[in-house]
Image: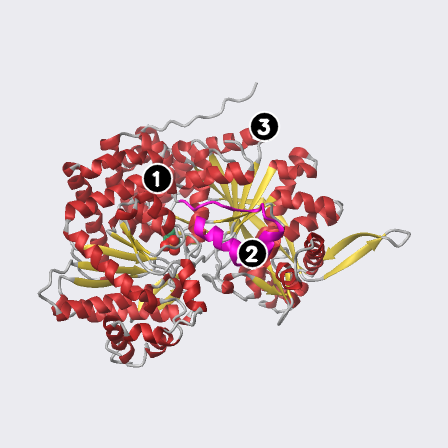
Amino acid sequence: MAPELPTLQSDPKSLAADILNVLRYRVGKDPSVATPHDWLTAAIKAVRDRIIDQWIESTKETYEHGKKRVYYLSLEFLIGRLMRDAFSNIGLMDDMRTALASLGVDIDLIATLEPDAALGNGGLGRLAACFMESMATVGVPGHGYGIRYVNGMFRQEIHDGWQVELPETWLDHGNPWEFERRERAFEIGFGGAVESITDKSGRLERHVWKPQERVLAVAYDTPVVGWRGNRVNTLRLWSGFPVDPILLSRFNAGDHIGALAESNKADALSRVLYPADSSEAGQELRLRQEYFFSAASLQDILQRHVSAYGDLSLLPEKAAVHLNDTHPAIAVAELMRLLMDIHGLDFDKAWKITRGTFAYTNHTLLPEALESWPVRLFERLLPRHMQIIYAINAEVLLEARAVGRFGEDQIRRISLIQEDGDRRVRMGNLAFVGSHSINGVSALHTELMKETVFADLHRLYPDRINNKTNGITPRRWLFQSNQGLTSLIRETIGDTFLDNVEALKELDDFAGDAAFREKFAAVKRANKERLAAVTAERLGIRVDPSALFDIQIKRIHEYKRQLLNIVEAVALYDQIRSHPERDWAPRVKFFGGKAAPSYHNAKLIIKLANDVARVINRDPAVRGLLKVVFMPNYNVSLAEIMMPAADLSEQISTAGMEASGTGNMKFALNGALTIGTLDGANVEIKECVGDDNIFIFGLKADEVASRRADGYQPREVIEKSPELAQALSAISSGVFSPEEPGRYRGLIDGIYQSDWFMVAADFDAYADAQRQVDAVWQDSPDWYARAIRNVARVGWFSSDRTIRQYAEEIWGVPL
Ligand SMILES: *Cc1c(COP(=O)(O)O)cnc(C)c1O
């Protein structure tokens, strides 16, 4: 007879008993000496135990029914804190609060001690995190695969206005969520040579790669709980370990450091995430990281497939492997290698399986962000993969030539190898040809993809490109981060929207209801007070919660145009001082975001925001009317505080350059009005919320392209705009940097000379739109009616919708 399985009770009393139990027997502490961190660990582990049953159930069910699995490969997972997510998704938030309170522990206090798992740069990594949660929610058997960076993304401090990068130490107190799976370890090779094995008659039988270096990839699993605990999926992150932890003979010979060299090399693989945002990270280590996690994941996937089904030709039926941008594109060559060299399939069979298995999401059109690696580096690090890429390329170019209508220029652009200059491997092209589906992340971006980066590949394979507009999980970005608004909505339209966010539509009718508007405004006010308190505590800056909170938080990048916003702030500052009699709408402009450490202009923009803030905030002439705040260390937890407190969402990228954006969706869902260009998903947000509930300005993508083509002269534009000219001249001449008057000359000269990002071209339109914002803000009922309509109409941007589309149209996973 099978032993009876334990079942765990989840009333507050049982929870409290279990927390004490965990504290004693797994943390090894008595309540009298337990630190807040100990309580956090005990609380998490007590709840984690309750997730495990469902986790095992989800896995078993997938296995027993032979269901297709989705494997999501991403170099980034920006998951942030997990405690609230998990407690709330399995419906234990209130009971845990009660249970902890009965033990004298404040759940909100220990929640702030949980470190932010900062395993991503920005939007791309956060999308992967939202997707993991939505897959578990809508019932997709999904596994995330990535790297367990010990130090993750850097922590940003601001010293004297400048960004300083410090290592993130999120694992210092251990990670109560994860399970180390030492037994789930795979060898990963680098370098060495390829041997050709021939049969007796001298015919090539197969290739054997003899790597020179080897490391172990060890799995660490984190359960990912879906809404209402329906499904629990797995995020598997790989960590680098040496095959030989210590070379004992060298150690004994006195070379203590050299003896540990292998250990250090393996360790370096899973140390830091290169904070390269849309710019090329040329480091060899980055390519090593990409191969390391792709190869480990594919070995894992194949091993599971072979043990369950045996037959490799069934792989596309049983597994969908998704490439989140080009970072894991090397997986295409690795799967080919495993199928041919290890499992003995011929090229044609392997190629068919490979293309049937992979799908790829493109995240950017910026040329500098299209990954490519020098052929020489590739040959040295991954000699067998280089051969395979040449073989794939030969096949693709043969196909292209057979079509007959491609000229040599087009053939050259289709090639996986860039031949001009130093020869490089084009990872985007590799991902494209190795996938049966290539998707963009907003309608506009998908169309531009067809016209620009992948124009030729699209002509060759016209059925592959499709659109899947990004989304965000409403659990984290509304239910958890904006509890006040969530309660108000439940009181007003009931609970249907908790399971189907598109039911938020019912709120639309309440935009005209004065009593509801007042309640809505009170919730917003409370969220702004919370942000004001954080601002006072962290920066010592006092801001008035009744002012308009105007927020731009995202990676600092020239195309995102924080500079346009700052220049407009300077112009506004001038205007307020010269026309104090006018009825100005009081504003606080918030900025936040990290700059890639090697990105000079982005770091200078951070300094400028801080310099401008310093001058404006201490000028009595604008007191109460304008404040500027730069919030350090923008991350998921800070976003959770800032999004609900926003009145105005700044989404002002140069049209054609932001692939989608997801920050724009989070703001709108929390009742902020967008001021933005027709770029990325802003276009679709405008369609959903309606023209009256968004402030759109500036050049459109095609207009940006034609202005550039027609010989755009920024100087002429600036000369025609006195406000702009004055603001630029103030910044350039050192008004905000008297201690170093020339600090911003280069930055501003860039606008005069080329202005690639169209700051000058869009300035007047932007400033006009801001004055419209002021006007609407002054009519408070109108403002809140528009804000309510935003909340009501953006349910479509739920990542549940996005994931259902991926499941049905890309992965072939029935729901
Ligand atoms: C949503 C999010 C982003 C993406 O913001 P965009 O405005 O779309 O660039 C970046 N970082 C964090 C922490 C986020 O939560």
| 284 left or right, relative to 176 | right
Q: Which mark is residue 67?
A: none
Provide the residue designation for mark 3: 64
Give the magenta range: 442-471
- Would you say residue 456 sits in the magenta stretch? yes
Where is residue 550? Give x, y as percent: 24, 56
Amino acid bearing label 3: Glu
In the foreground, 242 or 794 = 794
Q: Eyeballing the image, is 403 above or below 803?
A: below
Amino acid bearing label 2: Ala
Label 3 packing within 10 angstroms: few (<14), some (14-19), many (20+): few
Asked whether residue 227 is in view, the answer is: yes
Label 2 packing within 10 angstroms: few (<14), some (14-19), many (20+): some
Counting residues from the start of the chain, the first of labels 1 and 2 encountered is 2
Which label lies toward us, 3 or 2?
Answer: 2
The span from disc 3 to disc 2 (Cα, nearest Å) is 43 Å
**Numbered disc 1: secondary structure:** helix
**Numbered disc 2: secondary structure:** helix
Q: Name the residue: 58% across, 27% down.
A: 65
Which label lies toward us, 1 or 2?
Answer: 2
Counting residues from the start of the chain, the first of labels 1 and 3 encountered is 3
Provide the residue designation for mark 1: 795
Pointers 3 and 2 in contact (CB under 8 A)? Answer: no
